[in-house]
Image (cartoon, grey):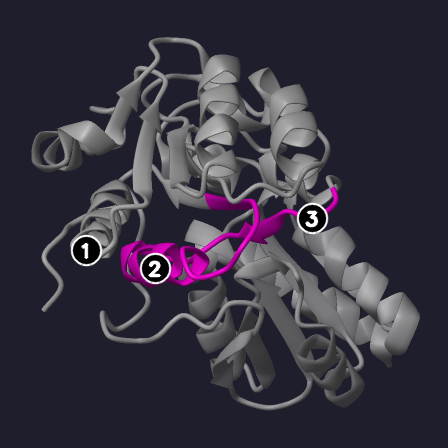
Amino acid sequence: MLSYKGTREAFTKALMDLSVDDDRFMLVSPDSLKAMRATPFAEKYPDRYIEVGIAEQNAVAVAAGLASTGLVPFVATYGGFITMRACEQLRTFVAYPHLNVKFIGINSGVFGGEREGVTHQFFEDLGIVRSIPGITVVAPADEHQVYHAVKAIANIDGPVYLRAGSGREHIVYDPETPFELGKIRILKEYGNDAALFANGFIMNRALAAAALLNEQGIKVTLADVHTLKPIDTPGIATILEKCKAAVTVEDHNIIGGLADAIAKISTDHCPAPIGRIGLQDVFPGSGPAEAVLDCYGMGVRDIVAAVQTVMDRKR
């Protein structure tokens, strides 16, 4: 049994496990050690932990320097601070020279902003990094997938951005379920009336919607698109070809994230009506995470209604 509870703890456990037999792995913290629940790593490997203070741009530059010497640094802090405050450094000093730096972003999405308000609800992060060449982009669904995803991204060369959550995530995977980078995972295959493509920590709602639709006689296929770059174009196109209609589900702005990625594949390979569940290009308010998701149209019944709508368009 894996010994952690929560996505941030899962990240730290994975990094510590990686570091047992490989001294290349480093942690660069812009005053984020406690937020990342990474104190155990700093205590066990003090020579592999670098604290730069509240200076995200500097953290990325330091990580670039470490990577240029053959080390594998992880920069771990709030997702928006990585992708917005340090965007230029991420782009120019890491992505452009294709350095082997791993970025772990917490508190992204509406689901992550309950404690700290709208300034810490980062719903643009995936779209920002998707637009930068050469960055692998990963949005796991729960703590177990975060653990396996961190180990998976450690084994590839080049920059990676991974969403690691806020500690409120619902568990949807068995702890031992492997994570296959760049490949979708079909979670439910009730039938081919429509497809549901989802990722991240809203996956429990997509699962509940698929079950409710099944009870109503609407048979959908639900796929976890945990890797946004490089995206599994053949796997997604195959589902679109079978279903001819789809709904995307993401805790992110519908611009730039999963919805746009699926729409491009549909346009290129199998044109189909697509509904988009996510933030509809608005700044959300803050509050209890579940209630805010419902308030902004990301509830289970919103997903069900979107599927019904695309099926009408399909007919």
Disc 2 element: helix
Q: Taking 221 as reference, is 34 left or right? A: left
Task: Work out how far the residue at label 3 is from the one at label 1, CA to CA, in angstroms.
Answer: 27 Å
In the picture as drawn, the residue positioned furthest to the top comes out as 54
Residue 163 coordinates in the image, percent (x, y): 45, 44
**In the rendered image, which quarter is residue 306 located in?**
bottom right
Residue 308 coordinates in the image, percent (x, y): 69, 70
Residue type, label 2? Lys
Give, as a single range, the part of the protein colored magenta: 133-162
Q: Is disc 2 in contact with disc 3, using a CB cutoff of under 8 Å?
A: no
Upstream in sequence: badge 2 or badge 3 = 3
Disc 1 element: helix
Residue type, label 1? Asp
Task: Work out how far the residue at label 1 is from the one at label 2, CA to CA, in angstroms.
Answer: 9 Å
Q: Which mark is residue 151?
A: 2
Residue 59 coordinates in the image, percent (x, y): 44, 20
Residue marked by disc 1: 17
Residue 145 lies in magenta, yes or no?
A: yes
Residue type, label 3? Gly
Q: Is residue 301 visible?
A: yes
Residue appearing at x 68%, y 38% in the figure? 97
Residue appearing at x 9%, y 69% in the figure? 1
Q: Which mark is residue 75?
A: none
Residue appearing at x 64%, y 43% in the figure? 98
Residue 139 lies in magenta, yes or no?
A: yes
Residue marked by disc 3: 134
Q: Is disc 1 in contact with disc 2, using a CB cutoff of under 8 Å?
A: yes
Q: Dot 2: within a 10 Å radius of its alpha carbon, few (fewer than 14), some, or many (20 or more) residues?
A: some
Q: Dot 1: within a 10 Å radius of its alpha carbon, few (fewer than 14), some, or many (20 or more) residues?
A: few
